[in-house]
Amino acid sequence: MTIANSQKITAWEDITGAVGNFRLAALLGWQDVAQRYRRSSVGAFWLTINMGVLIAALGLVFGTIFRSPMSEFLPFICVGLIMWGYYSQLINEGCVSFISNTETMLQLPLPFFTYVLRTWWRNSIILFHNIIIFPIVLLIFGKFMGWTSLLVIPAFFLVSLNFLWMMVILSVICTRYRDLTQIIQNIMQVGMYVTPIMWQPHQLPADKSILLLDLNPFYHLISVIREPLLGQMGTPLNWGVVIGMAIIGWIVALLFLNRYRSRITYWL
């Protein structure tokens, strides 16, 4: 029954159906978090504590190595590490969004995009837990967020749009080619070091900035969130790349899902 339905429904119908019934994906994502920390008195805040310790340790180490003022470097690395942890989890777990829901997908005729939304919402809940570290860091140094921080709202919307289309494509490909999941995880590990997370863009030699900054999509995805929180607006290039990626990415994702949707259940 599910295979037959997967052959009839188009990618657009699948995605709009999942978005229209977002409450189901949100409930499943919330249950994932609640079940993982069911018997813990602190719950998901254990991840926040771990992230806080990591930020403090890496901030002190790399801030000392680069001789950067802690009042500037610690907020910088704080946002970078929190957002990179969010991005890498979306990509890594997005690769197995279908594989980890095999039994449900083979039994219930739900839109496939529901499982992608489930992964996105589960990790977004964890992000909302972790982001509370940032205002604490600001208070330590006597700083406060300005009006530019409101740009985080449209920035997060654009970032989510980008990662959702990435997760759609990766979930389909990794369902067919299971070894690709490990390759993606390795790429994300390396990506953390070539993206300005633990080092600042101005520390990069001018002849390397085009490769590691302008041509690095993760730099732009990080910047549209981090810069407003740090009192800047981000460059027009940052916003232009993120918007362009969202438009082109979703066109490709819709075409991709529309072509291979009927085969996903066979690959499972």
Image (spheres, rainbow, N blue to C red):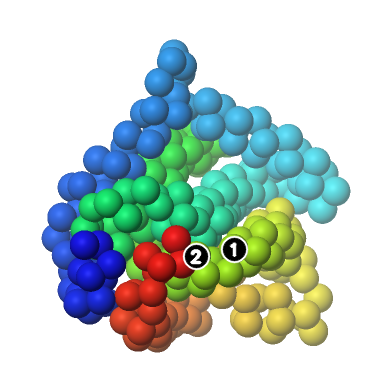
Q: Please tell me which residue lies in front, 203 or 186.
A: 186
Q: Are marks 1 and 2 in contact (CB under 8 Å)?
A: yes
Residue at the right extreme, as displayed: 65
Q: Quadrant of the N terminus?
A: bottom left
115 relative position to 227: left or right: left
Q: Which residue is mark 2?
A: 175
Q: Quadrant of the C terminus?
A: bottom left
97 relative to 242, above or below: above
Q: Which mark is residue 56?
A: none
204 relative to 69, above or below: below
Identify the residue shown where x is 20% and y is 69%. 5
Q: Disc 2 marks which amino acid?
A: Thr
Badge 2 local density, few (<14 within 10 Å), some, or many (20+)? Answer: many
Identify the residue shown where x is 30% and y is 62%. 112
Question: In 3D space, how far apart are the residues under numbered discs 1 and 2 (Cα atoms)?
Answer: 6 Å
Identify the residue shown where x is 46% and y is 67%. 267
Q: Disc 1 marks which amino acid?
A: Arg
260 relative to 102, above or below: below
Residue at the left extreme, as displayed: 20
Identify the residue shown where x is 77% and y is 66%. 203
Q: Is residue 205 visible?
A: yes
Q: Please tell me which residue lies in front, 116 or 244.
A: 116
Q: Is residue 243 visible?
A: no
Disc 2 secondary structure class = helix
Where is residue 51? Give x, y as percent.
59, 36
Where is residue 92? Give x, y as percent.
55, 56
Q: Which residue is mark 1?
A: 178
Q: Please tell me which residue lies in front, 111 or 54.
A: 111
Where is residue 187? Give x, y as percent.
69, 65
Where is residue 178? Give x, y as percent.
59, 63
Quarter residue 168 falls in: bottom left
